[in-house]
Amino acid sequence: HLVTEAENAESASNGAHRLCFVDAVHRTITGLYSIPIDDAPLLAALQLQSAIGDYDDAVHGPTYISDTGLENYVAPALMGRFNDDDELEDMVQEEHMQLVGTSRFEAERRYMQVIKSHVEYYGASFFAVRVMVQATDSEDDRSAPKPAIIAVSFEGIFLLSGWNLSVQEFH
């Protein structure tokens, strides 16, 4: 199983490790993985550490994050929850500065660990579905179909809905 192989990887050249990292970044930035707002600056900094290495004021300058697009590091839904982009960029830069000396491999591994600690359907395959609900003790008609996402993984099958793709339980 790919996620297990990535977790056991010993270097950044491991294909499973790299694939899982790139996939986790994509799913986080597009909002498929819902993370706490407090972790957004750290995750963005870990991406930067993987991509460009250690922060160096002489090389990167004050706008190195916005020059490449802050939205490449933080999901748009989370960006809107900060007071402004400059504040968020400062927070990401502070986190990035604290990662000096962290290897690309360690930054990527830590990124995936943070995601996995918040996303129980980490590594799942996603399928768009429409859900109709009917109370078990009711003979009324079912509700109108509502869009949702099914996540299928080795951990189980999850029904996700809402703006933050929270796991839904139906009995």
Image (spheres, helix red, strand yellow):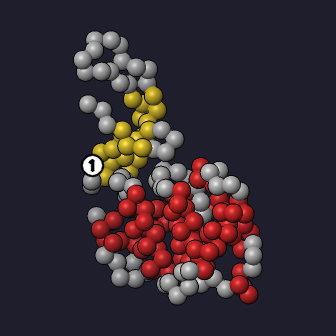
Report the side of 161 relative to 51 (left or right). left
The one nearer the camera, 12 or 47, is: 47
Name the element at disc 1: strand
Q: Quadrant of residue 49?
A: bottom right
Report the side of 77 relative to 155 (left or right). right
54 to 25, vertically: above or below: below
Q: Position of residue 136 (x, y in %)?
A: 25, 21
Q: Quadrant of residue 48?
A: bottom right
The one nearer the camera, 39 or 160, is: 39
Q: Residue furthest top?
A: 140
- Amino acid on which the number 1 mark rests in the picture: Gly
Q: Identify the residue at image location x=39%, y=29%.
A: 131
Q: Identify the residue at image location x=62%, y=51%.
A: 81
The one nearer the camera, 90 or 65, is: 90
Q: Is residue 127 visible?
A: no
Report the side of 111 relative to 168 (left or right). right
Q: Identify the residue at image location x=56%, y=80%.
A: 98
Q: Residues within 10 Å of mark 1 (few under 14, many from 20)?
A: few
Q: Is residue 44 visible?
A: yes
Q: How many marks?
A: 1
Q: Identify the residue at image location x=68%, y=54%.
A: 83
Q: Quadrant of residue 5?
A: bottom left
Q: Position of residue 101 (x, y in %)?
A: 52, 88
Q: Position of residue 77 (x, y in %)?
A: 59, 49
The quadrant of the image that shows the C terminus is: top left
Q: Which residue is mark 1?
A: 156
The quadrant of the image that shows the N terminus is: bottom left
Q: Position of residue 75 (x, y in %)?
A: 58, 55
157 to 74, vertically: above or below: above
